[in-house]
């Protein structure tokens, strides 16, 4: 299959993990930041090394991009550029996530931060054949109060380019208990809910995310294989899994593409979707994720179409918008 040309959907893509190295260098120079001044050095810092041994190590690659995402202008720019990069490889719809909590170092308010990325997104939508929405991620190592603040301040943007909230960062057992209140509030306000869970060996977190937080989708969920309860919940309630194969190899959730459970899940009628996670940190694209999965499992055209249609179903958009996305693949 010529995946570059085929229509694609990315439901799990972090803004801060998807910056162009050239742009990072540009912003460092423009803002006179005391950071690496060489493109090669930047590229190295932005991408998870082959030797990456865990999610925690993978997450260290976000320090540099976050340092250059602290002004309105720079947030607008990186948001526009991610949409542009996605459009160039025929991604027709993308849900981009980021944690506003991490962009206040130069004094921006949550409102200014969200407005800036939304502006970049809508500028790209006017030029390219792509649509997008934002997911507000809350860092799990921060407090429930901090997550509540994002839920409260992001509320005014629901339906204006913001569709959901997420929990992300390092994963420990039982993390969901801490976030019951903010996620309850989020549901009341009309946010859709997706949660990173089951990425580091703890299947029970997936069951918790669904039962305690009302997660409608799960980021990764690879380790439902460890928990009968989580597996059955995902299967029976048709909870879509946002699978990001390359990222899972880097964080050592799986050994290689061939050993990724995505195809077993697919064959067991679990609703899998295929996504990038982080275009720069994982040095990947949607095209590349598709190619690797095609290679590993001899994916047929109908199977790719099924997975694309799962993404359409799982997207946090209206029925009309879903219909438009279905038409691309006919
Ligand atoms: O695969 C992942 N699992 C958990 N957290 C992640 C992953 N990729 C990125 N982030 C975290 O999400 C934040 C907001 O975008 C990033 O700064 C990073 O810390
Ligand atoms: Zn992620």
Image (cartoon, rainbow, N blue to C red):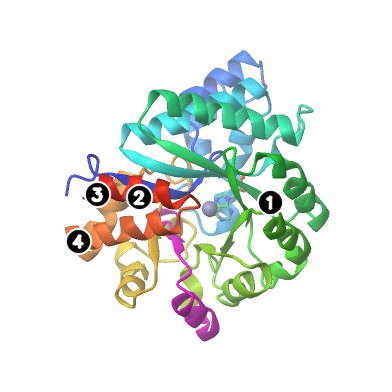
Give the numbered dot on residue 302: 4
Q: Nearer the viewer, residue 244 or 160?
A: 160
Q: Which comes before the other along the chain, label 2 or label 1?
A: 1
Q: Is residue 246 magenta?
A: yes
Q: Which comes before the other along the chain, label 2 or label 3?
A: 2
10 Å crowding of disc 3: few (<14), some (14-19), many (20+):
few
10 Å crowding of disc 2: few (<14), some (14-19), many (20+):
few
Q: Which residue is mark 3?
A: 329
**Residue at (80%, 55%) from the top-left corner?**
143
Distance, label 4 to label 1, CA atoms, is 36 Å
Residue 180 place in picture, x, y as percent: 74, 66
Q: Which comes before the other along the chain, label 4 or label 1?
A: 1
**Residue at (18%, 57%) from the top-left corner?**
301
Nearer mark to the viewer, of 4 and 3: 3
State how many labels appear: 4
* Segment tinted magenta in the rendering: 226-247
Give the numbered dot on residue 138: 1
Residue 84 vertical placement versus 61 (above, below): above
In the structure shown, which secondary structural element does the residue marked by tag 4 occupy? helix
**Residue at (39%, 68%) from the top-left corner?**
271
Answer whether labels 2 and 3 touch (C-beta < 8 Å): no
Q: Is residue 295 magenta?
A: no
Q: Which residue is mark 2?
A: 323
In the structure shown, which secondary structural element does the residue marked by tag 3 occupy? loop
Residue 27 vertical placement versus 201 (above, below): above
Q: Which comes before the other along the chain, label 3 or label 1?
A: 1
């Amino acid at each position: 299959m010529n995946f570059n040309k085929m229509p694609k959907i990315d439901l799990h893509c972090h803004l801060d993990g998807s910056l162009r190295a050239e742009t990072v260098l540009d912003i460092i120079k423009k803002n006179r930041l005391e950071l690496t001044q060489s493109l090669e050095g930047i590229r190295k810092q932005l991408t998870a090394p082959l030797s990456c041994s865990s999610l925690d190590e993978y997450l260290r690659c976000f320090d540099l991009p976050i340092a250059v995402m602290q002004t309105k202008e720079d947030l607008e720019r990186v948001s526009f550029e991610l949409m542009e990069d996605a459009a160039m490889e025929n991604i027709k719809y993308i849900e981009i996530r980021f944690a506003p909590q991490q962009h206040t170092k130069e004094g921006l308010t949550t409102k200014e931060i969200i407005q800036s990325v939304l502006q970049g997104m809508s500028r790209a939508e006017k030029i390219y054949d792509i649509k997008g929405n934002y997911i507000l991620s809350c860092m799990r190592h921060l407090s429930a109060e901090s997550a509540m603040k994002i839920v409260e301040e992001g509320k005014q943007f629901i339906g204006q380019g913001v569709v959901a909230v997420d929990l992300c960062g390092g994963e420990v057992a039982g993390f969901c208990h801490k976030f019951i209140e903010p996620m309850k509030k989020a549901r009341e306000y009309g946010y859709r809910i997706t949660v990173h869970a089951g990425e580091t060996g703890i299947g029970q977190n997936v069951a918790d995310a669904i039962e305690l937080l009302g997660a409608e989708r799960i980021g990764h969920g690879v380790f439902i294989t460890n928990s009968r309860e989580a597996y059955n919940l995902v299967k029976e309630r048709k909870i879509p899994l946002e699978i990001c194969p390359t990222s899972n190899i880097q964080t050592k959730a799986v050994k290689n593409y061939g050993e990724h459970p995505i195809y077993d899940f697919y064959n067991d009628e679990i609703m899998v979707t295929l996504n990038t996670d982080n275009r720069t940190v994982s040095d990947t694209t949607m095209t590349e994720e598709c190619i690797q999965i095609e290679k590993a499992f001899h994916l047929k055209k109908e199977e790719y179409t099924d997975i694309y249609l799962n993404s359409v179903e799982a997207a946090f958009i209206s029925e009309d918008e879903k219909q438009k996305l279905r038409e691309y693949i006919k």
